[in-house]
Image (tube, rainbow, N blue to C red):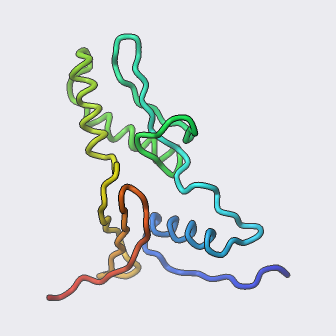
Amino acid sequence: QKETRKVTFEKTGSGLIAQLKEYEELKRIKPRYNQPKGKLFTHGLYSETDKKGFVHLKINLIKKDAEALITFNGPESGASFLQKISNEIETGKDNVDTHNSEIKEILTAYSLGKRTLLLRDKGREIGEQSVIFIKDGEYKGYVRAEPSNK
């Protein structure tokens, strides 16, 4: 308590914005005892090809020697993503080319790649929204906005 200078609280409106805000604040303030946990995204989606040529996807800690196809802030969100896309794969369980083509299409649809985009999320109050800015596939920041009546 002696070394605590100030404790603040800010309503964020969503878990995603709360995580982004915490990460930004820890990097900005650089407190002695409450360090940022390294990277915001700790787990990645990686592909492996088996002996028959089928592509398989799995979630692992981010590796320095391999680029993740998609990154996640933990193993749970990665597993949730794998479950979601496994429900989207309709055919190709026996045909290598069809199976691999479906995997590629799904990954293209969900991957940020080098895209620039705005993501809308809940705001702190009814009528307010949060907007997350991604530029060239990297998080740049967020703002809060109220829809215009015009």
Please identify the quarter of the rendering in which residue 55 is found.
top left
Q: Quadrant of residue 23?
A: bottom right
Of residues 136 and 51, the one nearer the viewer is: 136
On the image, the x and y values in percent for residue 13 come to 43, 74
The quadrant in which the N terminus is found is bottom right
Q: Is residue 98 above or below residue 115?
A: above
Residue at the image position 43 percent from the left and 24 percent from the top? 48
Residue at 34% from the left image edge and 68% from the top image edge = 121
Please identify the residue farthest to the left as the structure is shown. Answer: 150
Residue nearest the viewer, comparing 131 with 82: 131
Q: Residue furthest bottom?
A: 150
Instruction: Return the x and y of residue 74 as percentages of the image width and height.
Output: 53, 48
Specify the quadrant that holds the C terminus: bottom left
The residue lying toward the viewer, choosing from 8 and 32, is 32
Q: Position of residue 92 (x, y in %)?
A: 22, 21
The answer to whether residue 31 is above or below residue 145 is: above
> Could you tell me how many numbered marks the image carries?
0
Residue at the image point whose x is 46% and y is 47% from the top: 71
Q: Quadrant of residue 88?
A: top left
Decide if residue 44 is on the left or right side of residue 23. Answer: left
The residue under the point 21% across, 86% down is 148
For this view, does 133 lie left or right of residue 23?
left
The furthest residue to the right: 2
x and y percentages locating residue 12 in the rendered image: 47, 75
> Can you say whether 57 is above or below 76 in the image?
above
* Residue sitting nearer the eye, 67 or 13: 67
Q: Is residue 57 above or below residue 72?
A: above
